[in-house]
Amino acid sequence: MTKKNELAGPGAGVSRCCRAMRAACRTLQNVLGVIAVAGGIMPLAGCDPLSLTMLGVGTATGVQHTLNGITYKTFTTPLPQMRTATISGLRNMGIKVASREKTTEGEVIKATATERNIEIELDAITPHTTRMRTSVRNGLFMDSATGTEIILQTEKALNNQKGASL
């Protein structure tokens, strides 16, 4: 009888309690692991559509994007032709040129559209190559879609210039 009481005594209760605590700890670890994995995957899932969109736009048109909304493209075209094509493209979009100023690398064209401030930098990389960089600000936000369209309209104007000269 003493052996039975010893087994049912304080030691038996502790082992039962320890088993319950271990089970609770394992469950908590599993839950925390799932939360950590989900927390790590969620930001990636949010960025995936953005990266796919940027990849699709960038590869289809040759227009590059930065994370802060600036778009740019390099053209095998001299700076004077780029300037003419850029102003023509802006005109086709109904965007008014506010100012033009020369820089050490090329030229900066500032323009305005409805609630948007546009800055276009034309940098002469070589006498026959010009990089175009557009930044379109809509209040606090950058508008890379309009920046991309400005580049595409400039490219279209360049193609029209080349077709007219043939």
Image (cartoon, rainbow, N blue to C red):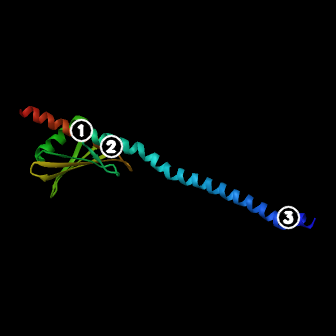
- At numbered mark 1, what does the secondary structure look like: helix, strand or loop? helix
The residue shown at (42%, 47%) is 47
**With 82 as the anchor, is 151 left or right in this view?**
right
In the picture, the disc for residue 55 is 2
- The amino acid pointed to by label 3 is Leu
Q: Secondary structure at mark 2?
A: helix
In the image, what residue occupies the spot 16% across and 40% down?
85
Q: CA distance from mark 1 to mark 2?
A: 16 Å
For mark 3, give the secondary structure.
helix
**Res. 113 visible in picture:** no
Assess whether mark 3 and mark 2 are in contact (beta carbons under 8 angstroms). Answer: no
- Which quarter of the rendering shows the N terminus? bottom right
Disc 3 target residue: 7
Task: Looking at the picture, tell me which residue is in the foreground, 161 or 96.
Answer: 161
Rendered-image quadrant of the C terminus:
top left
Residue highlighted by disc 1: 152
Mark 1 crowd level (few <14, some 14–19, many ≥20, 10 Å Cα): some
Amino acid carrying label 1: it is Leu
